[in-house]
């Protein structure tokens, strides 16, 4: 499973990258707005740090403008994945860009039917938003299961399921059990995977017992 960080925070990105836990980054207009930074230079900086795919989302909703925005974003760096919304115009841009060899991440996916259309449009990634479905008492993880089951039936589909809107480690674990290709989540959720009280307790006991030996390995 690939781990993408759903953030534009440079420090968080660098920390995960140094830990060897970062395979890519996703951003969206809300994340960019929160950063307070200029969009293009920020994506350029992230692309310089991260080798894997960096999702940069178009801002418009009409085909003509999204097409121009997508081409501009794709030109920033080879590892840019242009993010487009799951709309008729967005999927038209997806087909146009993917036919030219550009990675496209189709976002705001909430149904298996939408995911089927994205695969047919040649998306490199589909982003089903599990957390936002959970937020309205629908089972977000069952959408992941449905999409994976559909995609497995068609060898021609190269679209990777990029589980998005992740709220907790359970979303990551359950998606991994199902074989989802990628998860994108806030860095804090990735860090939560490290933690277990029995690990902390056991390590403290090892350290204490080692001290009693009076020895040093070095
Ligand atoms: O960036 C796409 C997605 O991960 C955002 O999810 O629900 O946390 O805004 P959310």
Image (spheres, rainbow, N blue to C red):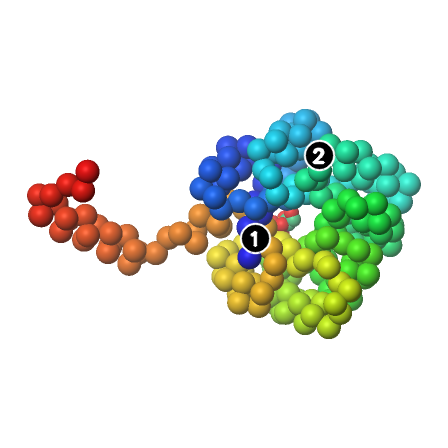
x, y percent for residue 98: 81, 49
Any mark on residue 45, and which? none
| Pick the front one: 166 or 18 | 18
Residue position for label 1: 2
| Pick the front one: 215 or 30 | 215
- Looking at the rendered structure, the secondary structure element under dot 1 is strand
Any mark on residue 77, and which? 2
x, y percent for residue 100: 83, 45
Left or right: 107, with 100 as reference point: left
Q: Write the residue at 71% across / 34% down.
A: 77
Q: Confirm or reject: label 1 Cβ below 8 Å from ligand 1.
A: no
Q: Residue furthest front?
A: 218
Report if the CB atoms under discs 2 and 1 are less than 8 Å apart.
no
Left or right: 139, with 75 as reference point: left
Q: Is residue 132 visible?
A: no
Where residue 142 sits, quadrant-wise, is: bottom right
Q: Quadrant of the C terminus?
A: top left
Q: Write the residue at 82% across / 56% down.
A: 121
x, y percent for residue 106: 74, 52
Pointer 2 local density, CA inside 10 Å: few below 14, some 14–19, many at least 20: some
Q: Write the residue at 13% across / 51% down.
A: 209
Q: Quadrant of the N terminus?
A: bottom right
Where residue 130 sits, quadrant-wise, is: bottom right
Say if 50 sits above or below 194 in the image. Answer: above
What whole-number distance in Å separates the C-alpha atoms at marks 2 and 1?
Answer: 20 Å
Q: Residue furthest right?
A: 64
């Amino acid at each position: 499973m690939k781990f993408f960080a759903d953030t534009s925070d440079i420090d968080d990105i660098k920390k995960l990258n140094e830990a060897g836990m970062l395979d890519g980054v996703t951003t969206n207009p809300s994340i960019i707005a929160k950063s307070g930074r200029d969009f293009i230079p920020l994506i350029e900086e992230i692309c310089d740090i991260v080798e894997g795919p960096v999702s940069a989302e178009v801002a418009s909703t009409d085909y003509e403008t999204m097409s121009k925005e997508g081409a501009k974003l794709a030109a920033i760096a080879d590892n840019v994945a242009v993010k487009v919304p799951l709309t008729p115009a967005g999927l038209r841009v997806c087909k146009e860009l993917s036919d030219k060899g550009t990675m496209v991440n189709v976002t705001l996916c909430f149904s298996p039917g939408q995911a089927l259309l994205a695969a047919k449009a040649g998306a490199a990634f589909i982003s089903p938003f599990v957390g936002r479905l959970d937020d309205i008492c629908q089972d977000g993880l069952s959408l992941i299961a449905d999409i994976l089951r559909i995609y497995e039936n068609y060898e021609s589909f190269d679209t990777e399921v990029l589980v998005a809107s992740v709220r907790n480690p359970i979303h990551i674990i359950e998606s991994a059990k199902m074989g989802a290709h990628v998860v994108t989540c806030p860095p804090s959720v990735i860090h939560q995977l490290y933690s277990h009280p029995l690990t902390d307790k056991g390590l403290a006991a090892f350290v204490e017992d080692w001290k009693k030996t009076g020895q040093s390995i070095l």
